[in-house]
Amino acid sequence: MCILGKYSADKLLLFSFICSLLIVYPNITWLPWEISMLADNKKIYYLLFFILRCILYTIFIFALIKINVRKIQTTSFQSRLLYNSLITLFAFCIYVGIFFILKVKIAHLGSLVLFQFFLICILCTLSSYIYQLYNEKKNKELEIEQLKIENLQSQYNALIYQVNPHFFFNSLNGLVSLIRKKDDLVTLTYVNKLSDVFRYILQSDKKGLVTFREELDFIQAFRYMMEVRFANKLIYDIKINQSALSYKLPVLSVMPILDNIVVHNIIDSDHKMIITIEVNECKELVVSNPIYPKIFSPTTNGTGLNNLKNRFSLLTNGQIKIKNDGVTFTVYLPLI
């Protein structure tokens, strides 16, 4: 079915011509006998008529296949057959009209030609239906390949986070600041949370979907580090029911959102950042924050949320939603 897949016009025309020859094959076998029964002055006209008939069949098959490939998108074989039957009936009427206009006596316009048009209808319907199945199979294969690519991209992003100088040095700066304050208890807790964050990131390349309980443990560790870093200027308001902990979502789904908030917003004494994390009645994880845009837009590649959208689409068949009303930025992540 490669001819129907990524076909060129000349290949499709050749395919149509071969099909037309198969359709009129009985007439080809009778042709020498029928010509021998005619007067000499009628033989050439009969042969020209036969050639014209083959050309018309070829054109019709060519057109019908193109209509099926480009216009008829139904997945039902019965519906496709019905559409093709109506088109074939219309083409048969045109065929009869052409020879009527040419004033050619058409003794063969009975059941044989009608049957041949019916064969064309069946042949084109089957060809286009097989093409559709083939195309769907290729799309599924491409989807699987895309999933593999996105998973690799997710692993790559995880590696980026592992060695991300911005995140790494900010973490170390926070640790240095705590050491200078000589607050041993907070410093020890900070180191433990930092260890939990990096352990989760390092293990993320082995996971696709994780329970929300696992992701929440990571959020709590990340939360502690960020609240220490920004003192009382950044607060996480986490409101999660126990019943939501068994839901699943792609690994490292929340970190790009939390990182996005810090990168794009001013966080200081005059712009206190309160990040709300909750699960709504639609089984969606909702992460929202007030918008305090920076005077100068940060230099980012913009792939964080886009990659998150793709991972949710491929791993869960769900779509994340983003709402920005100019006051609050909210991201909705569907949970499984």
Image (tube, rainbow, N blue to C red):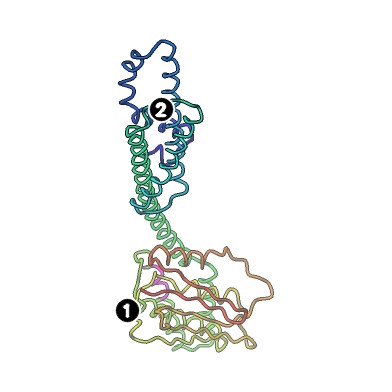
Question: Where is residue 69, by image quadrant?
Answer: top left
Question: Where is residue 250, by image quadrant?
Answer: bottom left
Q: CA distance from mark 2 to mark 1?
A: 75 Å
Horizontal side of 248 relative to 301 (left or right) equals left
Q: Nearer the viewer, mark 2 or mark 1?
A: 2
> Label 1 neighbourhood size at 10 Å, few (<14), some (14-19), many (20+)?
some
- For the residue labelled by badge 2, is the local secondary structure a helix, a strand or a loop? loop
**x and y, in percent, of residue 196 in the image:** 39, 76
- For the residue labelled by badge 1, is the local secondary structure a helix, a strand or a loop? loop
Return the mark for residue 183: none
Q: Nearer the viewer, residue 11 or 160?
A: 11
- Which amino acid type corresponds to the residue marked 2 in the rendered image? Ile
Residue range of the region highlighted in magenta in the rendering: 197-203
Q: Decide whether the magenta segment is chiefly helix, strand or loop.
A: helix
Tag 2 near tag 1, CB within 8 Å: no
Q: Which residue bears the numbered disc 2? A: 106
Q: Which residue bears the numbered disc 1? A: 246
Quarter in which the N terminus is drawn: top left
- Which amino acid type corresponds to the residue marked 1 in the rendered image? Ser
Image: 335 above or below 111 = below
Q: Nearer the viewer, residue 325 or 60?
A: 60
At 45% from the left and 67% from the top, the residue drawn is: 162
